[in-house]
Image (cartoon, rainbow, N blue to C red):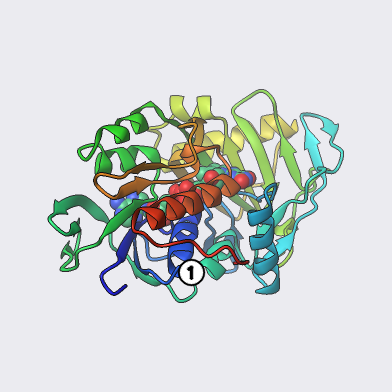
Amino acid sequence: MDDVRFAVIGAGMAGLACAHELARADAKVTVFERSRGLGGRLATRRIGQLAFDHGAQFMTTRSRPFGRYAETALRAGVLDAWRPRIMEDDRTWPAPIEDWWIGQPGMSALVRPLARNIDIQGGIAVHELIPSQRGWELQTDSGRQNVTFRAVAVAVPAPQAFALLGPHGRSFQHIGGVRMAPCWTGMFAFDPPIDLGADARRWTTGPIVWAACNSSKPGRPQTPQCWVLHASSGWSRDHLDLDAAEAARLLLQAFEEGVGHKLPTPVHQDVHRWRQALVEQPLGLSCLVDEETSAGACGDWCIAPRVEAAFESGRSLAHSLLSMAGLSARVTRP
Ligand SMILES: Cc1cc2nc3c(=O)[nH]c(=O)nc-3n(C[C@H](O)[C@H](O)[C@H](O)COP(=O)(O)OP(=O)(O)OC[C@H]3O[C@@H](n4cnc5c(N)ncnc54)[C@H](O)[C@@H]3O)c2cc1C
């Protein structure tokens, strides 16, 4: 099996779920990740004592495989339950029927059990996939990799996946129909803490759709008290080109309008612009794979804007690639 070597591009939940499944079938896998850290949109920004989960806020588990993965993560100490008091507009919300799970100590930790024993090349962005007689070669920002991969799994957001795979097969043209929405995220810390009557607030109208007290999540620093705000897709799209200082000012102002009163001056403020945050129009398939070229794509954008969808898509692509390479997936517990 020495010659069966897979490349996975992207170390978010989809890419690592794919790599983990390939490795469980004893295939050789190398993951290339543009950032230094793992997790993609499962992200935590730390500044001194402060911590903000500024991407995904929590995850739910609806399928058995993902439920089993959550059990593994719980045993590994990287998963915890979050039971916030919730308000929508001005009404208190009943507790969610599903459990809300968070990463420990931050959201990115949720992928750690998948990354164990996987060869991950961090800080390397893949710019081009080059077909060769024996498979695929990769052009990266640190030059051309001198390895040929039998198959390649692209696990990056839809527009980047389209740029990499678009030139290589008709089936990848479908990625062009996927639409992802941006999200401006505000990160504000207050000292002394503020009391908004809930740990998480949602709004059905206005620029802000979500505000969560990060400090209310287990294992997060309590003081200064950290809040994460998410702007709506529409507002984020209309204000995509704002500079950071103006975005912070407008987000804080909209937050004050949402809660109905002035807030103390934050002791820290920061913003992040997610250009590809949430899937608005998914592909409608669990993954995309092209048998002729031995390449495929996965990600939340195949199914739905959820962490679990990314996991499901990554596993699905791994199973397709393994069967194309004549290998079988392990059916035992992860
Ligand atoms: C603001 C926000 C809030 C959200 N809230 C929730 C929530 O509460 N619950 C929930 O279930 N989901 C939520 N989501 C969605 C969830 O985060 C995603 O569904 C999931 O994390 C997507 O995983 P992925 O692996 O498909 O993609 P990503 O996490 O985007 O991973 C892709 C990876 O590929 C890397 N990459 C990109 N291009 C290249 C390249 N050329 N070369 C190498 N590497 C590359 C990126 O750096 C990244 O690490 C939220 C997302 C955002 C942004």
**Relative height, residue 19 to residue 171 (above, below):** below
User: In this picture, is 156 found above or below 70?
Assistant: above
239, above or below 69, in the image:
above
Q: Is residue 87 left or right of residue 108?
A: right
Q: Residue at x 38, y 39 (%)?
A: 158
Which is more toward the observer, 303 or 227?
Answer: 303
Q: Position of residue 5 (x, y in %)?
A: 29, 66
* Residue 256 showing in the rendered view: yes
* Callout 1: SS: helix
**Rendered-image quadrant of the C terminus:** bottom right
Question: Residue drawn 84% across and 36% down?
Answer: 93
Q: Residues within 10 Å of mark 1 (few under 14, many from 20)?
A: some
Instruction: From the top left corner, tell me how far across and down residue 263 is, in percent.
Output: 70, 42
- Choose top left, top right, bottom left or bottom right for residue 28: bottom left
Residue 118 is drawn in which quadrant?
bottom left
The residue at which mark 1 appears reads as 24
